[in-house]
Image: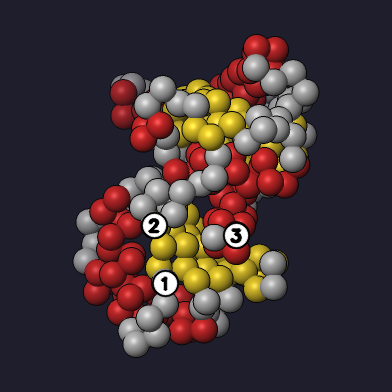
Amino acid sequence: MILAIDIGNTTTNFGVFEKGKLKSKFAIATQPNRTPDEITLQLKALAKTRRLHLRSARDILICSVVPRMQGLLAEALRSLTKGRGMPIRVVGQDLRVPLKNRYTYPEQVGQDRLVGAYAAWKTFKKDCIVADFGTAITIDVVTKAGEYLGGVIAPGLDISLEALATRTALLPKVELKEPPELLGRDTANSIRSGLLYGCVALCDGLVSQLKRHYAPKAVVVATGGASGLIAKHASTIDHLKPNLVLEGLYRLATST
């Protein structure tokens, strides 16, 4: 069993892989203000409810954009697997994503973006554009030759919802879900429509430009928490792979 962990700004996702298949997936909130003991207790509870036998793991691979949460989680995992000598490896520290990083300042690229690009590249073996709809929206380009060229970053849907609620006097915080139609007929659905279809337009517009300038024949892959909602309406998305980063971590674990 291989355990892949993707620590994002809002959610930490766990993927349990056995014989090349993602057998189960679960998530906890990314809360770096907690103590290692609190996270240990939460993982113990999850291990029971999810039948996750941590001591049987052959490898644990972590990808993180939240350094403090990464440290806390690694400490909790070591306490739960004490005596096994099990490797707990962090992408960017203990192993590198095997792409040629063409960013001007390579150290500035989030490891999750590189892992997602690597997974798409290994899966499709051609030019790829990876659109990740998480806390932030990132749209990245990786070539058939295995070169990560770079990408664009924009605020995610949850950030936009929160900004409207906190930076305006009369607009409420609403639940993110698909509106009944494009035209909003009340405030809540006007916000939902603006954010959803605005994000779809952003995706289609940016992907079209990235294709035109850098990778005309690229396969477009959508991932991230809101990817299912966006992919229903975006015309430029070819494949929906919500677990792309976890799959990339598994590929790294089995190839290094």
Q: Position of residue 35 (x, y in %)?
A: 22, 66
Whether tag 2 and tag 3 are in contact, CB under 8 A, the answer is: no
The residue under label 2 is: 94
Three-letter residue code for mark 2: Asp
Q: Earlier in the sequence, mark 2 or mark 3?
A: 2
Q: Is residue 183 visible?
A: no
Query: Closest to the observer: 134 or 165?
Result: 134
Rendered position, 204 above or below 142: above
Where is residue 142, by image quadrant? top right
Query: Closest to the observer: 55 or 256?
Result: 256
What whole-number distance in Å separates the C-alpha atoms at marks 1 and 3? 15 Å
In the visual, does 224 lie left or right of 123?
left
Query: What's the coloring here?
Result: secondary structure
The residue that appears at 50% across and 71% down in the rendered structure is: 59
Mark 1 secondary-structure assignment: loop
Where is residue 106, by image quadrant? top left
The residue under label 1 is: 87
Q: Earlier in the sequence, mark 1 or mark 3?
A: 1
Query: Closest to the observer: 144 or 244?
Result: 144
Q: Position of residue 39 (x, y in %)?
A: 31, 69
- Which quarter of the figure is the C terminus placed in? bottom right
The residue under label 3 is: 255
Q: Earlier in the sequence, mark 1 or mark 2?
A: 1
